[in-house]
């Protein structure tokens, strides 16, 4: 059975506009930018989220840059596999592994960033969110191993919608400040 980890099944609410954006962006990516550059850039976005979240302890407007890092990670994550398929780089299994491992680290960086900002009694909620999102990720990987069908969206909610939720949370933190 052929590896199908590069083919996602199921559709999120924003699936169609995402496909149009991807089709528009792919030809604009310079040839010198390879799929692995896009994948590994998640490390930089994750580290910058930690830096900006730390700085937001002193001025919440730094969360705008945290939101920008979420957008940057979205764009590079959107394009890494598509560029690999378009250019036939042959890094399918490496891309599958590294992309999803780094997606988990990215999620952790966002939640660690929130833990730097929110009062201590919210730490349990952040742990619960990590456990919940981690469970969805593990479910996707185990289901793929059993069925060779890779699904990352459930009830129309996928990674893009979750990123939008995080940007909304950041905006609320900027506008209303930290809760007590």
Image (tube, rainbow, N blue to C red):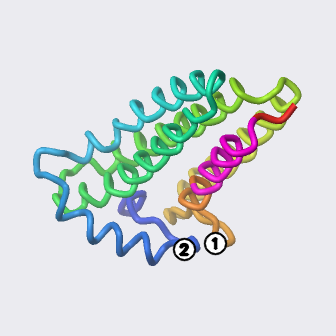
Q: Is residue 162 above or below residue 15?
A: above
Q: Residue 72 or 37: which is nearer the viewer?
A: 72
Residue at 25% over, 61% down: 85
Q: Note whether residue 80 is visible.
A: yes
Left or right side of 17 for 105: right
Task: Provide the residue span drawn in magenta.
Answer: 164-177
Q: Secondary structure at mark 1?
A: loop
- The percent position of residue 151, horizontal first and vertical second, equals 55, 64
**Residue closest to the far left:** 31
- The percent position of residue 152, horizontal first and vertical second, equals 56, 60
**Residue closest to the far bottom:** 16
Left or right side of 120 for 39: left
Which quadrant: the C terminus? Answer: top right
Q: Note whether residue 146 is visible.
A: no
Q: Which residue is mark 2?
A: 11
N-term mark: 1 or 2: 2
Q: Is residue 34 above or below residue 78?
A: above
Residue at 57% over, 53% down: 163
At label 2, counting other C-alpha atoms closer than 10 Å, the crowd grade (few under 14, some 14-19, many 20 or more) is some
Q: Which residue is mark 1?
A: 156
Task: Please report contact status of discs 1 and 2: CB closer than 8 Å, yes or no.
Answer: yes
- The percent position of residue 100, horizontal first and vertical second, equals 48, 44
- What count of labels does the image hold? 2
Residue 66 colored in magenta in the image: no
Q: Magenta residues: mostly which secondary structure?
A: helix
Residue 168 colored in magenta in the image: yes
Q: Residue 67 or 96: which is nearer the viewer?
A: 67
Residue 19 picture quarter: bottom left
Q: Secondary structure at mark 2?
A: loop
Q: Residue 130 or 58: which is nearer the viewer?
A: 58
């Amino acid at each position: 059975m052929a590896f199908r980890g590069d083919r996602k099944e199921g559709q999120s609410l924003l699936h169609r506009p995402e496909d149009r954006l991807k089709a528009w962006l792919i030809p604009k990516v310079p040839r010198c930018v390879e799929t692995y550059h896009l994948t590994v850039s998640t490390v930089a976005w994750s580290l910058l989220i930690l830096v900006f979240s730390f700085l937001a302890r002193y001025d919440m407007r730094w969360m705008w840059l945290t939101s920008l890092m979420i957008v940057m990670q979205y764009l590079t994550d959107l394009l890494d596999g598509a560029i690999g398929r378009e250019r036939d780089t042959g890094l399918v299994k490496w891309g599958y592994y590294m992309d999803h491992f780094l997606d988990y680290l990215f999620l952790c960086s966002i939640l660690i960033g929130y833990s730097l900002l929110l009062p201590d009694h919210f730490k349990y909620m952040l742990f619960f969110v990590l456990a919940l999102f981690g469970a969805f990720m593990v479910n996707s990987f185990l289901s793929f191993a059993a069925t060779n069908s890779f699904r990352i969206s459930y009830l129309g909610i996928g990674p893009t919608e979750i990123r939008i939720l995080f940007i909304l949370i950041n905006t609320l933190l900027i506008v209303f400040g930290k809760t007590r």
